[in-house]
Amino acid sequence: MPPADPDALDAALDAYAEAGERGTSPDPATIVAELDAPECAQLEALVRERLRALPTPIFAGSGDALERRRAALGRLVAHLADRLGRPGELIDVHRGDWLRGGSVMPLLELLRDHHRADEATMTARLALLSAEGAEEEAIEAFLTRDGQPPDGWARAVRAFARAPSVEGWEALFQFTPPEVYYHRVRATLRLLRRLGVPSDTVFKLATHRGVTPDAIELAESGAVDVNTILDRMTEAPARSRSLWLGLAARAAFAQGDRFGTVRFLSEAYRASAEGYLPVIQTTEIREQADDELNAMLDRAGVPRFEGDD
């Protein structure tokens, strides 16, 4: 596709669209890869004409045959436009796939290919918040592709894990380029956890220069002693007090400490004069709490938010 004969081209497009309705259409990227620019332009014009001729679905997201046909043709035309230097539609397609639960990697690769590095990095960091398993590893590899650790890094981390300290942590990252510092820290923290370094120690390292996603994850899992979080709070600026109290409340909740949960959340709201409110921790605790704990939170003056029972 596209063949020289217009009738054959129409038939090929019909077959492609019908396969799209069944969910068996070929990957548009493989089709487009075989075409030169004039052929892409010819095919794009024809596919857009087909799309204009299709009726608009009454209910978006119904997944009926018409919507599947439109989606298949839409993917094809997006790949054609990208091949001709107009990536916007294909970016939207890949972003939609990701938001519906698919992999974010096609979107990240496309953004990088079109020199939209800042958008790619921001999207990758956002995707990391919920990624797991192979997807998480792929995103990490994408983020560190241009800044792989030097030879001997894993060996140095293992040596550090035998006697971890803040001073050793600073020395470990002394010559790390700023553009890869964030990602290398995250990867190193995860390696330390796999090496069996105590969670409280990993938390202290993860919060050495502020709060990181890894620190939040550890606290919310209940793996960090509440006193470790409170000790970190005493070292931080006073304006961040409510942030640390919110994390302490989340840790207490994960550990089954109901009174600690109420105490730390109520203290967090009393300490929130600087503007930070532990809304995320409060919402998560409210959603998982039973009626008795929610009543205790009500009496302590912890607010409810829209959607809380």
Image: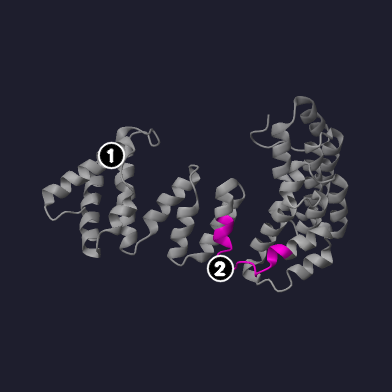
Q: Residue 92: horizontal and vertical position, in percent? A: 42, 52
Which labelled disc corresponds to residue 146?
2
- Which residue reaches farthest bottom? 175
Amino acid at the residue labelled 2: Asp
Please name the residue shown 30% across and 33% down the image: 65
Residue labelled with disc 1: 19
What segment is highlighted magenta in the picture?
139-155
Q: What is the C-alpha distance between the residues marked 1 and 2? A: 39 Å
Q: Is residue 241 above or below residue 14?
A: below
Q: How many marks?
A: 2
284 lies left or right of 43: right
Crowd class of label 1 (few under 14; some 14 to 19; many from 20; radius 10 Å): some
Circle 1 — which element? helix
Residue 50 place in picture, x, y as percent: 22, 46
Amino acid under disc 1: Ala
Q: Are marks 1 and 2 in contact (CB under 8 Å)?
A: no
